[in-house]
Amino acid sequence: PCGRCGDCKAFYCSMGTSSTDCQSCRSLLSFRDLKECGRTCCPGVPSGATYYCGFRVTRVVSVATIRCSRYLAHTDSWLVSLDDDTDVMEAYLESRVANAGHLSSPEPGTRVYATGVIRWTRAGFRLSLNAIRCLTDLNEETMLRRAQVEAYRHCLLAAKERWAREAARVMLSRVLWYGNRNRFEIMEAHVKLAIETALIGARPDEYRTWYDEYLAEIQSE
C-alpha cells in the first residue's frame, strides 16, 4: 500500500517497469486515486542520456540514490545530495561509473567525489558533474552505502510520488479546461487517457481522435 492515504489500495510499480501496458499504473488512474496520490512507471531512458532519472523531481529532501546509464538497468549507483533551492549537488561515484561518464579521477581510488548542478529536461534531469577527488576511506564507503538504502526508501520514492501527483493535477486541469471551453463532456476515460499519456507515454487507440484534437488545441494557444 502507498502508505500516504488510508483508503488508497495502490501499490508502487516496479522501478524497472518500462512497459506502457503497466496494469498497476492504469488501475491508479481513477478520480479517487488522483485526488489522494499519484504513481507512475517510466519508459526506458534514451540511449544518449548518460546521466538520467526517469522522472522529473521538483523538490528533493535530503539525499537520493540515482542510477546511471540506462534507467535502473544495472547496479552501478552513487549517493547524491541535492540542494532544494539551488539544484547544486554533490555525488560519490564508483570509479567505473565516473569513467563511463568521462569524469577523470584525480588519483586512484574506489569512489570519486564530484559536484555539479542539475540540468532539467522535459523527461527528467541530467546531472552535470565535475570530478573533485577520490575516496579511499573504507569507513566512509560503508557509511555512504548505508545512507543509500535509507535515501532510496525515504527520499527517492517520495520525490517520484510528488512528481506524479503534480503531473496528474496539471494534466487534469488542462483536460477540464479543454472540455469547458469546447462544451465537451469529459468522461472518466478521457481523464485516464490524458494523465496516462502524460505519465507513461501510453495512448490507446480509443479516444485517439479526441486526444489529438485536444493536443492541437492547447498547442495553438
Image (cartoon, rainbow, N blue to C red):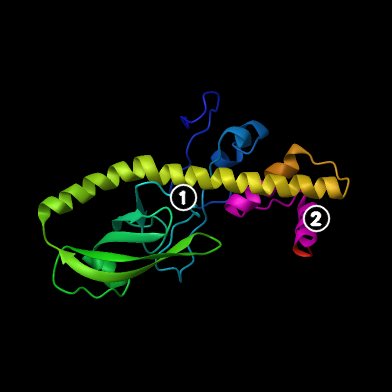
Mark pair 1, 2: CA separation = 35 Å
Secondary structure state at the residue bearing disc 2: helix
Q: Amino acid at mark 1?
A: Arg
Q: Relative to residue 154, is residue 97 depicted above or below? A: below
Secondary structure state at the residue bearing disc 1: loop
Q: Residue furthest front?
A: 85
Residue at the spot 58% in from the left edge and 51% down from the top edge: 20
In magenta, the rendered stretch is: 194-218
Image x and y of residue 125, in percent: 47, 61
Relative to residue 12, is residue 73 drawn left or right?
left
Image x and y of residue 97, in percent: 28, 65
Q: Which sits earlier in the primary sequence, circle 1 or circle 2?
A: 1
The residue tagged 1 is: 59
Relative to residue 30, is residue 132 drawn left or right?
left
The residue tagged 2 is: 209
Are there few (<14), some (14-19), or many (20+) residues within 10 Å of tag 1?
Answer: some
